[in-house]
Image (cartoon, grey):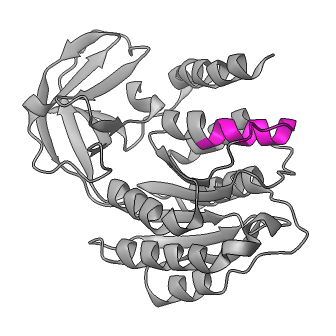
Amino acid sequence: MTWCFRRLGVLLMMAAAVCAWPHTMDAQADAGGRHLLVSVTNGAGAPVEHLQPSDLTVREDGVAREILSVSPAPPPTHVALVVDNSAAALTFITDLRQALAAFSTTVAKLSPAPHVLVETSGERPTRALDFSPAGAAVDRAVGSIFPRPGAGSYWLEAIVDVATRLSTVGAERPVIVAFVVSAGPEFSTTSHTAVADALRRAHAPLWTVELQDPAPPQSFARRERAMVVTDVASASGGGTQAVLASISLPQAFGKVATAIGARYDVVYARPDDLVPPRTVTVTGRDSSWHVSVPSWANQ
């Protein structure tokens, strides 16, 4: 299977799996309508504020539905932070720590502040901090991250590990934020489909920050990782921030922090006698807006 067909395959896989996914906080039905949890940012990555029902369009299998209300959603209850600290991160560890520290500070200002987990992926998935209140403990954990000379990354396995942890603690509104160096080797044997399935079970959107290498991935594991960075992240209701230089990492993490803290609860009407739709899409009035909604939104 070629690289192009593999990228298409993950989207088809997520669409097919969605019919078997359970109800989640991202898409719930009650007497007042159906709820979607979405993030809406503009072309600069800033949150779109003061949204009204007329600013969005919800379609089920291409059919527009009436939006009953749009209101700010509560922040995530749990944020799992996965950090690639393989040998590929050796030359810019200072920039990375500063970016993570700024991210931690922003997340701690959410009200209520989420619990945060920190895990590194260099050499093997390593839990640096289990879920703890955002603040000093998280700051200490990200400040103690160091690269592992000579080590490759097990980034895909680390994401599955933290997704499993989210399922174990029963996180109500979880988010996973994962940093990776695309030039570094990937030694995970986990596939992109296994990562997508773990995210589905945890009901967790994945947001990725990638220090990008313009060269296409060559190994099987790196191709699987590249699909998770972009396609799986998007299908989960998250997104990707790609940078070419480590000096841009604080800005990239800042955009992710903004997106996860600026979500909306969209309530729309659906006829009771309809079977669940195959697809649910949400678009903004402005074509430059980016609306993130999980693939399991049709449940």
Residue 196 appears left or right of 134? right
Residue 180: image location, x then y, percent: 66, 57
Residue 214: image location, x then y, percent: 68, 43
Residue 128: image location, x then y, percent: 68, 78
Residue at left offset 76%, top offset 73%: 90
Residue 38 appears left or right of 160? left
Residue 191 visible here: no
Residue 22 visible here: yes
Q: Nearer the viewer, residue 217 or 265?
A: 217
Q: For residue 166, which quarter of the picture?
A: bottom right
Residue at left offset 27%, top offset 37%: 289
Q: Is residue 221 magenta?
A: yes
Could you tell me what secondary structure mostly forms the magenta stretch? Answer: helix
Classify 33 as above or below 263. above
The residue segment tinted magenta is 215-229
Q: For residue 158, which quarter of the picture?
A: bottom right
Residue 129 appears left or right of 157? left
For the C terminus, which image quadrant? top left
Q: For residue 92, which quarter of the picture?
A: bottom right
Q: Is residue 245 magenta?
A: no
Q: Nearer the viewer, residue 22 or 96?
A: 96
For the N terminus, which image quadrant? top right
Q: Nearer the viewer, residue 283 or 251?
A: 251
Residue 243 appears left or right of 265? right
Residue at left offset 61%, top offset 59%: 179
